[in-house]
């Protein structure tokens, strides 16, 4: 247990420090740039996410799945094979994007005469792919300190470059993109230096699995991940279609506060993925995963209820221009919470190599998201977009939990969890639309938080048994 906690801390402290820095950096940045320019930058990063995942083509998850099945230089050979696919896809994507740069630039930036913003986006995407592969190697080697140091380094560089560029170069989205590029480039250089022993040696032993095996595992993840990015971005894209960059910026401001919690989710998933594979390979039964879900569930719901009860206070971090974002915070907080819980309940899909179910679930959830966004966003604006996004992720969690349980059963107490989840969601809608007295709603949130703790108190008190079980 102590070893697991130590390794988790090594992988997590970088994210936690990054979270603490975000509390300081987000208010500074949002006070230096208008919601409209902030919205344009957010849309540009949507394109970056699309490009990055398309170029990866599931290579990072394929590397994670087969890493512990290989020895020595075989791991390097696996990475080279996956990297060649990424280079080919990146080249094709870059050529197509540059051919149609006017149409792409007009949609994202409102201009069709300047090719440089698109070049910056492609540059960020390419560096992001390299960073993802390097990070996966670091994660699978369980080098938590190197992983955390890189996160802190890139966070500080990005903040310093952003402030300097916004104040003395240009008070626009271009400064944010340049800062992003410089920060990721420095992070990649650090990873290249940190993992240099991994690249030493020309010998590339033959892999025990064929390229067809790698492709069969990777392509469903690539497609489902691409659909997932559309799922993450559809709310902003629909807002841009029906409204303008100002509304997107307002919504993105609230989303930026919520994504500060995404840092915690990333910290957990970073260590959880290799740990879950390792425990499964060692023949652990599902009790370990049930205990993990119980602890994470309590944490996730307490965070959700805290954000619901204090949305007006939290939004002050963004500044006066983003005050309208307080309406979306109580709903958007469900996104990282549901992602966190899903990361535990869906492990059976990858364990049994049934990655085709990722496509089925993600496609279903994406369809629901598109329908809700198209119906609610034109009527309710950013509130409608937040309802569509949050409800979609609730369905996302439920769907993955049901499907994942088919392959690896994790006993989740549906009655207690679902009652709390439904009440919390209704409470979030009430706070967003200010349906009742806000003091009463906050009191309900506090009472509900107490019930969450009480409902799982028995499990928490049995953590001593959990520690003995791990031994």
Image: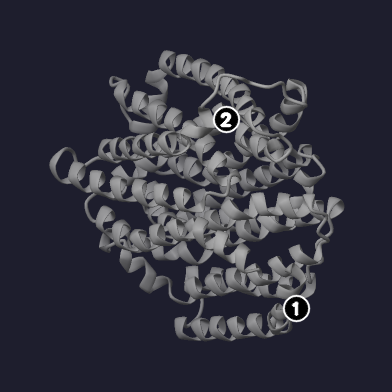
Give the residue at x 36% y 25%.
118
Using the rendered image of the protein, determine whether residue 125 is visible from the camera's viewpoint: yes
Label 1 crowd (10 A; few <14 / some 14-19 / many >=20): few
Q: Nearer the viewer, mark 2 or mark 1?
A: 1
As drawn, which residue projects farthest toward the left? 168
Q: Which residue is mark 2?
A: 56
Q: Which residue is mark 1?
A: 465
Q: Position of residue 165 (x, y in %)?
A: 20, 41
Q: Is residue 135 left or right of residue 44?
A: right
Classify the position of the C terminus by image quarter.
bottom right
Up/down of 28 relative to 205, above or below = below
Give the residue at x 72% y 25%.
215
Q: Position of residue 189 (x, y in %)?
A: 38, 34
Give the residue at x 30% y 50%.
156
Q: Is residue 381 left or right of residue 426?
A: left
Q: Which mark is residue 228?
A: none
Depth order, front residue of 367/121: 121
Helix, strand or loop at label 1? It is helix
Give the residue at x 61% y 42%.
228
Q: Earlier in the sequence, mark 2 or mark 1?
A: 2
Up/down of 268 relative to 201, above or below = below
> Tell me, what colour scheme is on the image?
one colour
Depth order, front residue of 219/447: 219
Up/down of 86 relative to 262, above or below = above
Q: Is residue 52 left or right of residue 426?
A: left
Q: Position of residue 55 (x, y in %)?
A: 55, 27
Question: Tag count in the figure?
Answer: 2
Classify the position of the N terminus by image quarter.
bottom right
Helix, strand or loop at label 2? It is helix
Q: Position of residue 312 (x, y in %)?
A: 38, 72
């Amino acid at each position: 247990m102590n070893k697991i906690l130590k390794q988790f801390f090594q992988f997590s402290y970088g994210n936690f420090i990054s979270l603490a820095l975000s509390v300081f950096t987000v208010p500074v940045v949002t006070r230096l740039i208008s919601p409209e320019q902030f919205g344009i930058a957010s849309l540009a990063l949507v394109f970056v996410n699309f490009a990055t995942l398309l170029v990866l083509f599931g290579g990072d998850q394929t590397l994670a799945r087969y890493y512990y099945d290989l020895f020595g230089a075989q791991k390097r050979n696996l990475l080279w094979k996956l990297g060649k696919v990424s280079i080919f896809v990146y080249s094709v994507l870059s050529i197509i994007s540059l051919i149609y740069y006017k149409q792409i630039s007009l949609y994202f930036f409102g201009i069709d005469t300047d090719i440089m913003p698109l070049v910056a986006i492609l540059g960020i995407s390419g560096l992001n792919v390299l960073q993802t592969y390097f990070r996966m190697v670091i994660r699978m080697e369980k080098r938590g300190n190197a992983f955390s140091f890189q996160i802190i380094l890139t966070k500080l560089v990005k903040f310093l470059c952003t402030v300097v560029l916004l104040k003395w170069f240009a008070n626009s989205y271009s400064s944010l993109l340049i800062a992003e590029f410089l920060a990721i480039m420095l992070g990649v250089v650090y990873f290249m230096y940190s993992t240099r022993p991994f690249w030493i040696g020309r010998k590339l032993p033959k892999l025990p699995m064929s390229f067809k095996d790698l492709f069969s595992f990777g392509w469903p993840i690539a497609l489902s991940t691409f659909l997932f990015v559309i799922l993450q971005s559809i709310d902003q894209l629909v807002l841009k279609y029906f409204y303008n960059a100002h509304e997107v910026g307002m919504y993105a401001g609230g989303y930026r506060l919520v994504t500060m919690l995404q840092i915690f989710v990333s910290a957990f998933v970073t260590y959880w993925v290799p740990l879950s594979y390792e425990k499964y390979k060692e023949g652990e039964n599902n009790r370990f995963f049930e205990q993990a879900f119980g602890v994470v569930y309590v944490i996730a719901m307490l965070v959700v209820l805290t954000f619901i009860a204090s949305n007006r206070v939290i939004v002050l971090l963004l500044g006066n221009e983003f005050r309208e974002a307080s309406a979306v915070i109580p709903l958007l907080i469900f996104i990282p919470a549901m992602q966190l819980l899903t990361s535990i309940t869906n492990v059976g899909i990858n364990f049994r190599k049934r990655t085709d179910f990722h496509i089925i679930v993600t496609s279903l959830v994406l369809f629901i998201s598109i329908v809700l966004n198209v119906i609610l966003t034109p009527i309710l604006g950013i509130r409608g977009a937040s309802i569509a996004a949050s409800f979609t992720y609730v369905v996302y969690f439920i769907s993955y939990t049901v499907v994942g349980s088919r392959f690896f059963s994790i006993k989740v107490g549906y009655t207690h969890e679902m009652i709390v989840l439904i009440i919390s969601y209704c409470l979030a809608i009430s706070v967003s639309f200010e349906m009742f007295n806000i003091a009463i709603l906050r009191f309900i949130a506090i009472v509900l938080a107490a019930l969450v703790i009480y409902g799982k108190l028995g499990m928490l008190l049995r953590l001593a048994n959990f520690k003995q079980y791990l031994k």
